[in-house]
Amino acid sequence: MNEIEERLDEIRERGLYRKLRCVSGPQGPRVLLDGRPVLLLCSNNYLGLADHPRVREAAAEAAMRYGAGSGASRLISGNMTIHRRLEEQLARFKGAEACLLFGSGFLANAGVVSALAREGDVVFSDALNHASIVDGCRLSRAETFVYDHCDVDHLEWGLRQAEGRGALIVTDGVFSMDGDTAPLPEIVELAQRHDARVMVDEAHGTGCVGPGGRGLVAEYGLEDEVDVIVGTLGKALGSYGAYVLCDKPMSKYLINTARTLIFSTALSPPAVAAAIAALELLREQPRRVEKLRRNAAVLREALAESGLPVEPGETPIVPLIVGDADAAMAASERALERGVFAQAIRPPTVPAGTSRLRLAVMASHTKSELREAGRVLAAAIPASARESVALGEAGATLGRSGVFDVLADAA
């Protein structure tokens, strides 16, 4: 047995083995999964725009007009007029001075954090931030302080310890695995008091929260107080790629320093055109955001009525925490047998002991579909496991024994 096979066996023994499933056809409320019709309850296609006719037609037209690919990085010959058009529209939509497109949300977060944080600086990162932020911290030469999830007291304590050093506070706006939101007003107030920059990842906020779906930063009216906003085109906007919103000097700086922008091929024209069409639909039809919120409330109500404890919230992300990785996988398979695809999420995506079914609502779901999903999920999670199904503090508590905590592998 070679080393790779031994590592795979170890992964299997820990209940963390993964395999690819295959969806046939477009992303919609119902899909064919490995040839079986199922209700899709784990897609980030929140507004149902990935298969919207206008979005698909825009992508097809762009392929015919501009070609399938951009051909080069943006700093060589890959920067096209269609990229500039989307950047201008995103900046107007979000009320920002400048916008830069990146190849993906992972590339945007990793590139921006590692460009802004230099040796001798400190990055303050929420314990449940996305893996792309974690890797951006690792790529930077700065020290990283991981503060307890949404704990502004712990964050303030860390900022006091780092007084006088360059600082960047980075947080998800809507946390992708828990569906809760960051305390942005308190974070911004601390940043101003301690002369720190603030970066917010709105990947799961754009199209889902805030006025007209403009995100959590807009919800709190903090557009002029947050230094950098990262967003994705691959979730509510139904396409692929990412963007960074900032002021013009910051934009120029990132063009010259963000390695994931400099050394990556520019987004393909079809993906950009699809995002433009989706953004237009979002601006024309803000009721899609309202429908998404109503659907999220319907699913939470259905789960509660079926005996599964859920906390109130307005985001489309509803986690059902099972605890054990094998138990979460078994619950996912039982739900799938009954026609509901709710993917099990296990470490390292979530902390050990908090494996879950991460449910994601779409605006295109019907109320009857969501109510039926609640009944199916209740049957899929046995009564013996329900005491573990809770939404409270999912993240592991980080001690305060040292000034700078080390990023955990499970972050």
Image: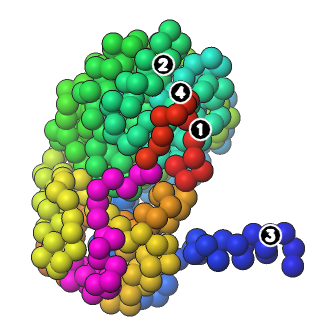
Residue at 63 percent of width and 37 percent of height: 138
Q: Which residues are magenta?
A: 373-396
Residue at label 2? 161
Q: Which mark is residue 112?
A: none
- Residue bearing the label numbered 4: 403
> SS class of the residue under badge 4?
loop
Q: Residue 22: horizontal and vertical position, in percent?
A: 52, 77
Please report the residue visible at 48 percent of the width from the left and 19 percent of the height from the top: 161
Label 2 SS: helix
Query: What is the quadrant of residue 322 in the picture?
Result: bottom left
Callout 3 touching callout 1 (CB < 8 Å): no
Where does the image place residue 317, in percent across and percent down from the top left? Answer: 29, 58
- Contact check, label 4 and label 1, Cβ < 8 Å: no
Tell me whether circle 4 and circle 2 mark residues in contact (CB < 8 Å): yes
Q: CA distance from mark 4 to mark 2?
A: 7 Å
Magenta-colored stretch includes residue 217:
no
Residue 398 lies, with reference to residue 40, above or below; the image says: above
Q: Which mark is residue 406?
A: 1
